């Protein structure tokens, strides 16, 4: 049995996300998928789903919804108040929400994006095997809006794990260290710019979404400011430097091509933490 979930408050942004649709860049289709993939996998495991089932990626909150069947849920990623009919419940564990009860996520106090998984996973239109919403290309399901009724897939045969709570630290609000490898166009920058890139702290600006994250700091100078770069393929985690000299980190819904030099690429193991950075938070890069 599946059921539905009526969204009473969608908040600033809520989208369906799974592990994305990798391998289609040659067709002009980006991978998309959850920004915090570790949080998605954990939420699904907690409710007994395969790790790649579609969940809701909720930015900041608040968010509220009511199921029409008894529904096991798990909330991971960002930390904030969670209630069922006003009763506080814990994140990072499996919670039973009775039919007709109101599940509510308050505004996140640490981190930025929560992943809400339901037992069975959310249904939605599939493209290339994924139910992820690509906000740049307009592919996949529409962003979730207040009043939407989301369909839940039938319950999987696997049981909810005996250990229904997972140890998880809240997202750090301080300066974060992000490991990078040299980018394919690092040679477009002189030694001073390369040194400054890793030595100075960068501030996350409000101009950040699923497509990319712009940083603020002392601008980086190219060796030849007038030189033009033909468009070339891009990947999630690429750190582009436009003419302003202020880096932009490309995220899951990034364009498949770009024309700014890539000075570095964020290591895959560190990309999840980018999903939880809030405007005003500082990051520092470390070459590996």
Image (cartoon, rainbow, N blue to C red):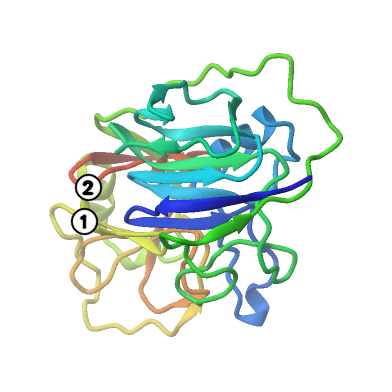
Q: Residue at x 74, y 15 (%)?
A: 162
Name the residue carrying label 1.
206
Distance of label 1 from label 2 (alpha carbons): 5 Å
Depth check, front residue: 156 or 84: 84
Query: Do the residues under discs 1 and 2 have CB atoms within 8 angstroms?
Result: yes
Measured along the vertical axis of the image, is residue 194 above or below residue 89?
below
Name the residue carrying label 2.
279
Q: Residue at x 53, y 49 (%)?
A: 56
Callout 1: SS: strand
Is residue 119 toward the left or the right of residue 55 in the image?
A: right
Which residue, as the protein is rendered here, is positioned at the far right?
157
Residue 114, quarter of picture: top left
- Give the class, few, some or many, for how many residues have Cα within 10 Å of label 2's Cα (few <14, many ≥20): some
Measured along the vertical axis of the image, is residue 13 above or below residue 276?
below
Number of marks present in the image shown = 2
Residue 241, quarter of picture: bottom left
Q: Earlier in the sequence, mark 1 or mark 2?
A: 1
- Give the class, few, some or many, for how many residues have Cα within 10 Å of label 1's Cα (few <14, many ≥20): few
Expressed as whole percent of the image width and height from the top left, the position of residue 23 reads 70, 66
Label of residue 61 in the image:
none
Which residue, as the protein is rendered here, is positioned at the far front?
100
């Amino acid at each position: 049995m599946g059921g539905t979930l009526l969204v009473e408050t969608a908040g600033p942004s809520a989208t369906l996300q799974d592990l994305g649709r990798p391998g289609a860049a040659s067709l002009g289709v980006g991978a998309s998928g959850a920004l915090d993939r570790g949080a998605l996998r954990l939420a699904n495991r907690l409710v007994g789903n395969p790790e790649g089932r579609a969940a809701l990626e909720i930015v900041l909150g608040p968010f509220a919804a009511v199921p029409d069947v008894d529904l096991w849920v798990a909330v991971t990623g960002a930390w904030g108040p969670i209630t069922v009919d006003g009763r506080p419940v814990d994140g990072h564990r499996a919670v039973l929400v009775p039919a007709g009860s109101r599940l509510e996520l308050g505004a996140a106090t640490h981190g930025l994006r929560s992943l809400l998984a339901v037992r069975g996973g959310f249904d939605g239109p599939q493209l290339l095997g994924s139910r992820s919403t690509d906000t740049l290309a307009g592919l996949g399901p529409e962003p979730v809006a207040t009043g939407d009724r989301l369909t839940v897939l039938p319950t999987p045969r696997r049981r909810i794990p005996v250990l229904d709570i997972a140890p998880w630290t809240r997202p750090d609000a301080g300066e974060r260290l992000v490991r990078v490898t040299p980018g394919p166009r690092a040679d477009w920058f002189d030694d001073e710019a390369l040194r400054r890139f890793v030595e100075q702290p960068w501030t996350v600006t409000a101009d950040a979404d699923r497509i990319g994250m712009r940083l603020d700091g002392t601008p980086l100078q190219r060796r030849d400011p007038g030189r033009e770069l033909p468009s070339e393929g891009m990947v999630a985690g690429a750190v582009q430097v436009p003419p302003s000299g202020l880096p932009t980190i490309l995220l899951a819904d990034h364009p498949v091509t770009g024309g700014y030099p890539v000075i570095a690429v964020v290591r895959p193991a560190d990309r999840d933490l980018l999903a939880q950075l809030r405007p005003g938070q500082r990051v520092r890069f470390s070459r590996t």
